[in-house]
Image (tube, rainbow, N blue to C red):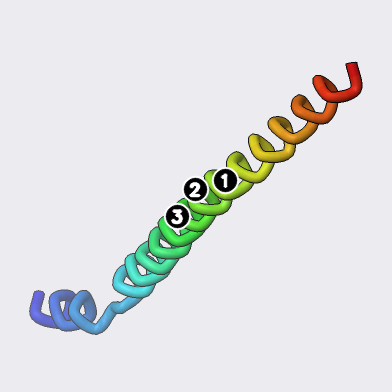
Amino acid sequence: MSKIFARFLKDESGATAIEYGLIAALISVALIAGATTLGGALNDTFQNISTKMTTAAEATK
């Protein structure tokens, strides 16, 4: 019984899987945060372009 318990304590494959899972989760959070920030900036840029195009179209009438 003690051999089985000692072998269980030496097995680190589960810990490695958990570490990879945590790394993947951190990368996902960073990607989501970056996409959210970039998405807001892109939205502002396209809104600005749309406003300028509308103003230019109104001026040519």
Q: Which residue is mark 3?
A: 33
- Residue 24 coordinates in the image, percent (x, y): 45, 62
Q: Name the secondary structure under disc 1.
A: helix
Q: Which residue is mark 1?
A: 39
Q: Residues within 10 Å of mark 2 (few under 14, many from 20)?
A: few
Q: Amino acid at mark 1?
A: Gly
Give the CA separation, mark 3 to mark 2. Answer: 5 Å
Determine the residue positioned at 45% across, 55% down.
Answer: 33
Q: Are discs 1 and 2 less than 8 Å apart at CB?
A: yes
Nearer-the-camera pick, 26 or 47? 47
Q: Which residue is mark 2?
A: 36
- Residue 9 coordinates in the image, percent (x, y): 18, 79
Q: Are discs 3 and 2 less than 8 Å apart at CB?
A: yes
Quadrant position of the N terminus in the picture: bottom left
Give the CA separation, mark 3 to mark 1. Answer: 10 Å
Q: Residues within 10 Å of mark 1 (few under 14, many from 20)?
A: few
Q: Quadrant of residue 50?
A: top right
Q: Name the secondary structure under disc 3.
A: helix
